[in-house]
Amino acid sequence: MSFSCDDLAVWKDFPKGLRILLCDEDRESAADTKMKLEAMDYTVYSYCREEDALEAVLTKAENYHIAILELTAINGHCSFKFLEMVKDIPTIVISKVHCLNTVMKCIALGAVEFLQKPLSEEKLRNIWQHVVHKAFNAGGNAISTSLKPIKETVASVFQIQSDFNELNFEIPSQFFDMEQEHEELNAKEKENDKFSAPSTPQLIKGERLNEDENFQDRTDCSEKDCAIEDKELSELPKCIVSETKFVDNTYNNITVAVNSDEILPLILEKAAAEESKADDCSSGHEVSLHFLSTDNVEKEDSDLENLTKKNPSNLNGIRGSRRRMKIDWTPELHRKFVKATEQLGIDQAIPSKILELMNVEGLTRHNVASHLQKFRMHKRHILPKEEDRRWQLHTDSLQKGYLQKPIMAFPTYNSNYIIPPSQAYPIWPHQTYHLPNVQMWRHSGLPTWHPPPENWQTKVYPEIHADAWGCPVLPHYNYSYGQYYIPPQGPPVRNNGQDVTGDRGRMLKSSYDHFTAEEVIDKVVKEVMRKPWLPLPLGLKPPSTEKILSELHGKGIHTIPPLHRRHS
DNA sequence: CCTAAAATAT
DNA sequence: GATATTTTAG
């Protein structure tokens, strides 16, 4: 049970009765702290050993609203086990240690605050705010009601960057992936300004603003004090360190594009959903990024509680994850990508340029590079080398031009044909379109293979795209499976609604006119190979035994084990 | 900065 | 288990 806004709403004399887990090895200070807290009508559960505290939390996390953990350097080393493991309870670290590195690490590990011992009543008084803060962030009412569109969000992230320079506070570069993280960190600063987080005079943020030295130079802490050395800090796994940036990253209902599998993606996705709604209305069709998250927007269960249940892998909380938000390569986005790629031509189509041309907010070069990689692989798969070669032998010069470029040919843009926006893309199946449907053949309007029309290159069949990534040719399939017949045009063959193709046929339904010929073939081949026992798709004639045998013979296979002959 | 390959997430 | 995307490494 995570603490939510609802809980807060019914809590009469909040924060009285706040349940605090206190873990301090120093009995004296523990007692002192406990006393102070109890004076404020907090309920304190005190532990001396980290292990005990940990066990208590892991057993019954809902028992505690907030944790106060003392960090002691033993032989110059601190244990961060608690911070590492406990993710769903706001944890305040208290310590005598005060070197920035240690503080940093704690924050990186998700601590909501770092308090210098000895603790004063003053420092402890406002710790309840962390609980509230968490409740707000738990996806309750406040958040769901007024989400900003993601575009704005992202935009704000970028604008903020300029503020950053004024801070004079540099995060060691090893902390961040240089592309965007700075912006994200900054967003945090800005957000903080808007809606101040619980803080005490010694909050890190304050230090950042005032400190003139940069982080690396900040080694003024004595060796004793500084439990963690720079080296160790720098060796912190990025995944952990990068979490720094989303500590307290959301305030109020404003969202910042940062990493978190839990809350933020949900928010972002909602925002994205809202935006796409808006897009539907306006025909302006700006491409925007859609971030994927683990959880489904449609479901309105945005409670942290629910979220955390769904993701038991990490010990939950707002600070669970590290991965960058996934980008949903929607058909629209992909279309932009392809367009940019086309425009650049094969030589120039590199991530940075594509990115530039695409001009999509928030998209990174990495994203593009990755997509490009996939795109190329896709091509490669569709036009395997060997087939490629064969193909060349059997085609006229017109086509050679395309195919000689081995794998990743970027055909020239075909100006003779204007692709209707509605049909031209997506070139790939989108996640939501799901699987190959063999019956695509019926609708695809693919030309009968063998005699390609002379104007092959310029003629575009209704549902074939002048795909940027290769000629819409179907070489190898023809080769290995023999001829197939597709009604050259006209309405799809329905066969009186009867499903001649059995199981394969059932997969019909998606809109295959979104696919290129290649893709259709690719899918069919895959499907057929996956379930060879099913009948071939309508119009696809199985190769004759003779053909197969001679083919195998040509490949040096002269004997066929009985099993392989069962169909003959 | 680019690409390929490995790691992860879905 | 396959696929999509991110991260890492060269």
Image (spheres, coloured by chain):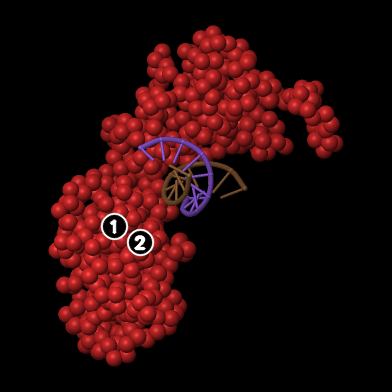
Chain colours: A red, B purple, C brown
Q: Position of residue A261 (x, y in %)?
A: 39, 57
Residue A19 x %, y %: 31, 80
- Residue that carries the numbered disc 1 in the rendered image: A172
Question: Which mark, residue A238?
Answer: none
Q: Chain of mark 1?
A: A
Depth order, front residue of A5/A112 = A112
Task: Mark 2 and mark 1 in contact? Answer it, CB < 8 Å.
Answer: yes
Residue at the image position 39 percent from the left and 41 percent from the top: A367
Q: Label for residue A234?
A: 2
Residue A443 in percent (x, y) is at 55, 25
The residue sitting at the top extreme is A454
User: Which element carries disc 1, helix, strand or loop?
Assistant: loop
Chain letter of mark 2 equals A
- Asked if A319 appears above or below A421 in the picture, the reply is below
Q: Quadrant of the C terminus of chain A?
A: top right
Residue A406 located left or right of residue A123: right
